[in-house]
Amino acid sequence: MPDSIADTSSKGSPGWLRVLEILAGLVLIFTSLYVWVYPGIAALTYVFIFGIALVFLGIARIGGAFFFTAASGGMRILAGIIGVLCVVIGFYAAAFPLVGALTMAYFFAFALMMAGIDRLALAGSAGGAADAPSWLKYLSIFAGLVALIVSFAIILYPGFGVALVFVLISLEIFLLGIELVASGATGRNVIGF
């Protein structure tokens, strides 16, 4: 275990990076919990907070790209690129929260629409295993229809889409925050990177 915040022991992350991971993780956890505790929070405020959290996450990923020497060069480059993208998107979302909120909702709606079309096409083309039970085909049709209905609801009522996206994103941010706190506390990445 490192003795000081500047220690760069080869057995784990440098102390300063561990502190940064813990801080980034706590920011992510508190950001996600804020949405659940105050469900009436304005979307613009949440996008601003989300943008700041993304900046912290991006800085942690950029640091990881330089100091996680056990990872392959490609993985380190990917971590650096993801870190830079997180910082840029975070600053953009903080500067223009309304555009950020609506953009997230519309991307989510588009992805759901594609998933719904995919489910319906697979169920209609008799795709899948030949020995699959018939109820599985009907389940795929149902899932596809629900995905299409939700995607059109998001497009027609962007406020609903923004709220749904924020709930899903806050859940993912919470999980990422827990992972970062665990990485920082142990000095090793939970996934071995």
Image (cartoon, rainbow, N blue to C red):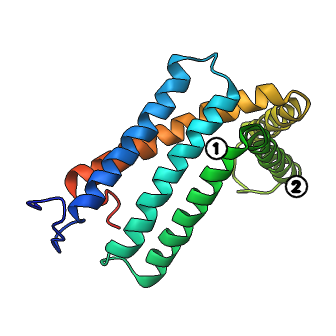
Locate the C terminus and report the quarter of the image it occupies. bottom left
Q: Secondary structure at mark 1?
A: helix
Q: Is residue 169 visible?
A: no
Q: Which residue is mark 2?
A: 125
Say whether residue 67 is left or right of residue 156.
left
Where residue 173 appears, x then y in whole percent?
50, 41
Residue at the spot 54% in from the left edge and 44% down from the top edge: 52
**Identity of the residue drawn at 85% across and 37% down:** 148
| C-alpha span from label 1 to label 2 | 45 Å
Relative image position of residue 186 (x, y in whole percent):
21, 54
Q: Nearer the viewer, mark 1 or mark 2?
A: 1
Horizontal side of 28 relative to 166 (left or right) equals left
Q: Residue at left 78%, top 47%?
A: 107
The three-letter amino acid code for the residue at tag 1 is Ala
Q: Circle 2: is it few (<14), some (14-19), or many (20+) Cα within 10 Å?
A: few
Mark carried by residue 170 = none
Q: Earlier in the sequence, mark 1 or mark 2?
A: 1
83 shown above or below 77 = above
Q: Quadrant of the N terminus?
A: bottom left
> Within the image, what quadrant is residue 68 found in?
bottom left
Residue 73 in percent (x, y) is at 43, 83
Q: Amino acid at mark 2?
A: Ser
Tag 1 residue? 94
* Secondary element at tag 2: loop
Task: Estimate how packed mark 1 is, as few (under 14), some (14 to 19) or many (20 or more) residues with alpha carbons within 10 Å.
Answer: many
Residue 142, compared with residue 123, is above or below; it is above
Asked if disc 1 and disc 2 are in contact, CB closer than 8 Å, the reply is no
